[in-house]
Image: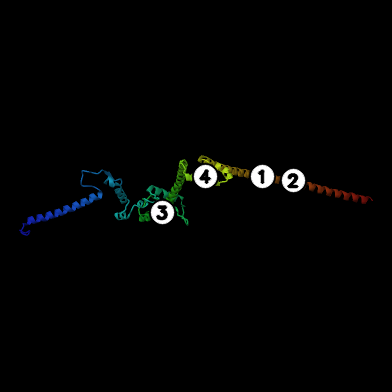
Amino acid sequence: MSAEDLPESYQERLERLQELSEFTEKCKKQLNDIFESLGWSQDYKGKEPMEQCPYDPNHRVPVRTMEKHKASCRLQKMGYSAEEQAEMYDPSVCYENSNIRSFTMDKSTQHQVILQARSAAPLMKMEGVFWQGQYSGQPVDVPQNHKRALCDLTVADRLALYDYVVGVFNQQKESAAASDDLYVDLVSKLQKDEKQNEPKSHLELMAEMRDYKRRRQSYRAKNVHITKKSYTEVIREVINVHSAELAKQWKEEEDEKDSSRSDRSSHSRWPDRRRSRSSESRHNRRHRSRERSRDREGKKKKKKKRWRRLKGG
């Protein structure tokens, strides 16, 4: 009996059954894909603990995939498409086994840096520098790719952020160098103490004896107090040298102040000397004019006497 000989109702039932089977398989595949993307399992016996997403309260995700979900959901809330997220990558992987330092910028720090740079900029447009109108006034999210950095931040904003990050790295480098110096000094001192406490070998003793014989008697006598100084004595001498230099500098400053005071006092006395000299010159002039007037009067009297004598003769 062929399928054509079957009743029409039975043929329709077979077709409906085939359609339902295909639809069921399709739905099952879609459900499996959804479970796999969410990290869920169809087996509810070993149910994993779930957490609520901080960016979307409607999302409940297993604990083991929460970090991955938060990163994706955060970018989605910031407006990044799925294609942009697929092109992104975590740069921290490149710095795991290297000495390169990294810096993570947050939104508040970015806004504060831009505001500080804007307040320090001139109000009006000037050649060669950025003015306040070239900085962003409103806070923006930290760009996660190059395209957003060019669109959301101005050239002045990017320069201010670059200078800030470079300054932070320089401070970290200086502090790390200072701590490394202290650590190296401490380690070398400890290693030196340990070596001094260890028993010396026969070859080391022979080498010390050889070096001791090579030295002159005067050299040994002059440098005994240097070679046997402890760490405390060396530090004390360093402090004394610095203290002496500071005292010398303070004394020079006091001498300069005293010299400036003496110069001021000498300048104040100079007008008095000028006044005394001017008064003396005036007195001398008066005295000379009086003497000249007396001489003239005496000559006039002598001429009158001679004239009288000539008349009387």
| 1 vs 4, front mark | 4
What SS does tag 2 mark? helix
Between 261 and 269, the residue placed more toward the observer is 261
Between 157 and 301, the residue placed more toward the observer is 157
Mark closest to the chain's N terminus, 2 or 3:
3
What SS does tag 3 mark? helix
Q: Which residue is mark 3?
A: 158
Q: CA distance from mark 1 to mark 3?
A: 60 Å
**Quadrant holding the N terminus:** bottom left
149 left or right of 282?
A: left
Percent coordinates x, y for residue 295 in the rendering: 83, 48
Q: Residue furthest right?
A: 313
Residue 209: which disc?
Answer: 4
Amino acid type of the residue that numbered disc 2 sits on in the rendered structure:
Glu
| 1 vs 2, front mark | 1
Mark closest to the chain's N terminus, 1 or 2:
1
Q: CA distance from mark 4 to mark 2?
A: 88 Å
Mark closest to the chain's N terminus, 1 or 3:
3
Q: Which residue is mark 2?
A: 280
Q: CA distance from mark 4 to mark 3?
A: 67 Å
Which residue lies at the image location 78% right of the left edge and 46% below the top edge? Answer: 287
